[in-house]
Structure formats: structure tokens, C-alpha cells
Image (cartoon, rainbow, N blue to C red):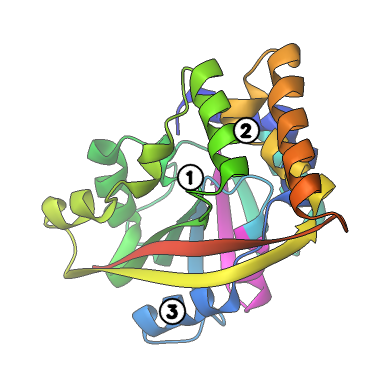
Amino acid sequence: MTVQRQLFDHVAAAYDAHRPDYPGELFDALESALGQPLLRAEVLDVGAGTGIATRALAGRGAKVVAVDPGPGVLSVLRARSTSRVRPVVGDGNALPLRDAAFDLVTYAQSWHWTDPERSVPEAARVLHDRGVLAVFWNLLMADGFSWWDRFAGSCERLSMSYDRRTRDTDWGAALEASGLFRWVRRVEIPWTRELSVDAFVADYSSHSYVADLSPDDQALVLGQLRDDLSELFPDGVAQLPYVTRTWVARR
């Protein structure tokens, strides 16, 4: 992760309260790739943030080292985690951990903050033989909906860092090209997220390309989003299509 990744320290509370959890099928897929339950597995969660994925992994019995460059988000993670989780301030491009230490390395919503030329060999280095790397994202699949196209278009116009097309990046290509993994597979898990319109708007206030806007621009894009969704969902409860997109690679 770059220094920019620490921006999430400033939105840690909104991030932790409103970002979605991951579907149980994701962790089933990770266990299938590992060939063993997560119970007592040694796991490294990189770019852990406030610990949404970390807590889910620990909830399945894994021992988790949670790495993030942001001490603010790690303080939230530490307060909400059990003794099975050990937070470490660190960079996904240069992991402060020993070789061959982990069964599983995960990057939840964080791989795109790294430089694959550095992060791929680093992830491979800390995995033991036949260990598994998994990079995954919860993705809102709303392209073509007028409310989303309006919001995304406004963000692209106002933010230098946002381009919705990056969602379709083939993150498995660098894993395959590295020659460090026996196989690489892509897994997609569709699901529906149900939440209040206000909670969804709060979620998007924690996305980097919104949090980085000026206060006036933030108010503009989030106000438009709230108005459009309130019209679409007059009872205040949104049902939205998501996909958890994952690349799994085996050493």
C-alpha cells in the first residue's frame, strides 16, 4: 500500500460501520483452495483496515496477523478483535514478516493499492509451500442504473483518482505471469445487499475518491446519491446487486 492508503484513518469509523461484510461462500472457497478448514490456520490479512475480513477469518478459528499502514484503522481493528488477531503496521509492498510463515495471505479490498511487481513476490515469500494467496473485492454491480451512472460520472469529473473501469482489471494476470504459483483461479460470488439508503450513502462517504473531495464536492455527490436512491426506494431500504470477485493462487 502507498501512503495514500492511510487516508482511511480519517474515515475509519464510517468504514467500519458501513462497509459490507463478505459472504460465507467466500471463506468456503478459501478453505477449498487450502484443502483444510481455516480453524487454526496461520493467516496474514494485508491492508486489513478496520478488520472486516480479519474478524471473519478469525471467526472461523484462524490465527490472523493483520497488516495495514494506517495506525488509526488498526486501532479500531484492535478494539474489536479477539486474541487470535495480531495487528502490525506495515506495507503490502514490503511485508515486515518472515519467510514461509503463513497458510493463507489475503488482500480484502486492498490489492489495488499495491505495486504488483513488489507485492506479488512479497506475498509468495511469506507463504509456505502450497500456501494460498487470495485477493478479493465486494463490487457493486450497478452499471446502467441511472442513479449509479450519475454518481460515478460526478466522481470521475471531480476526482483525479477515480475511474470506474478499474473495477474490470484482470488482477490475476500478474499472479500468473509471475511464475510463483502452481495455479490461479477466478471465483465470483453474486449476492444481494439490503441496507438503508442512509447507511449506503455513509458507506460511500468512506471510499477514497469521495473522502478526498472538498467538503462542497462531497456534499454534492453524496446529496445526489441520497436523493436518487430515496426516490428509487421510497421506504428507505435499498436492495442492491453485488459480486465478491476473487483471485485465488496456490504456491
Residue 211 higher or lower than 100, as above or below? above
x, y percentage for residue 65? 56, 56
Residue in the foreground of this view, choosing between 74 and 24 = 24
Between the C-alphas of marks 2 and 1, the distance is 13 Å
**Contact flag, marks 1 and 3 (Cβ < 8 Å):** no
Residue in the foreground of this view, choosing between 160 and 84 = 160
Query: What element does badge 1 sit on?
Result: loop
Q: Which amino acid, mark 1?
A: Ser
**Residue drawn at the location 39% of the way across and 84% of the way down:** 32
Q: Which amino acid, mark 3?
A: Ala
Badge 2: residue crowd in 10 Å (few <14, some 14–19, many ≥20): many
Mark sitting earlier along the chain (1/3): 3
> Which residues fall within the magenta stretch?
53-68
Report the quarter where the C terminus lies.
Answer: bottom left
x, y percentage for residue 178? 14, 51
Name the image quarter holding residue 70: top right
Report the quarter where the N terminus lies.
Answer: top left
Query: What element does badge 2 sit on?
Result: loop
Badge 1: residue crowd in 10 Å (few <14, some 14–19, many ≥20): many
Residue in the foreground of this view, choosing between 20 and 85 = 20
- The residue where tag 3 is placed is 29
